[in-house]
Image (spheres, rainbow, N blue to C red):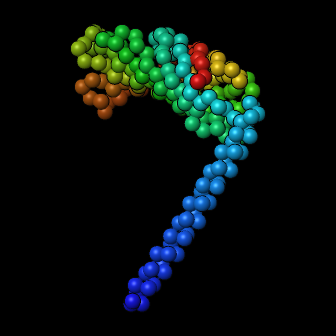
Amino acid sequence: MSKARTHLLRFNAAISKRIRGVAAKIIVGSIVLLISEKSVSADSTAVLRKKNIAFVTFGGKENFGSVNYERVFFMGNTVNWSFALGIQPFQPSRKLAFPLSVNAFTKGRLHHLELDLTATFFMDKFHPYTNGWQEDFNKQLYLTPFICYRLQGNQGLILKTGLGPQILFDPPSNDVLAVRTKILQPSFFGSVGMRF
């Protein structure tokens, strides 16, 4: 057997031994993590177990309601982060909106301060600059930073309210790069939801 082949076989054996060692450490570490999570989550205040939220919001664009889904994607020592997406089905053949938001709310047992940044993509067949209904959709973006209060305890019910200024980005249908911006009156909303 040549020296090169002997070295290659030793090298493969060493790599295999290391891979088995790393795999064993990952398995043991995962088991320890699962056991520690089970013992921590026995205390109901330590871990937010239900990270999905379905809620209905009233207010916002044209003071209509929206149906939304929220997911808590990061839980820190003092702040939790979530994202939400929804739909405002005004009259789907004439008006439609999709609110998307990123939310940061404080940890606590019941009362939470929350900051939201919401972008609402709004489509309407009414074109305000040509004063009339058209066949194509007039597309607008409403960007709203909200300061909110969230009531969320250990049970599934969540209540939330917020207030913030609206910034309108309105590109004309014939030239989307000529965006008109306008600061509108503050928007107010209220939400009722359930965690699952």
The quadrant the N terminus occupies is bottom left
Q: Position of residue 85 (x, y in %)?
A: 47, 26
| Residue at image point 34% right, 22% down | 139
| Residue at image point 45% right, 84% down | 7
| Residue at image point 23% right, 14% down | 135
Residue 188 seen in the figure: no
Q: Residue furthest front?
A: 1
Q: Position of residue 8 (x, y in %)?
A: 43, 81
The quadrant the C terminus occupies is top right
Q: Is residue 184 above or below residue 108?
A: above
Residue 11 seen in the figure: yes
Q: Nearer the viewer, residue 182 or 173?
A: 173
Q: Is residue 156 left or right of residue 67?
A: right
Q: Nearer the viewer, residue 14 or 156?
A: 14
Q: Is residue 34 above or below residue 44?
A: below
| Residue at image point 53% right, 66% down | 19
Q: Is residue 163 above or below residue 80?
A: above
Q: Is residue 118 above or below residue 19?
A: above
Q: Position of residue 176 (x, y in %)?
A: 30, 30
Q: How many marks?
A: 0
Q: Quadrant of residue 26?
A: bottom right
Q: Is residue 140 left or right of residue 80?
A: left
Q: Position of residue 128 (x, y in %)?
A: 33, 14
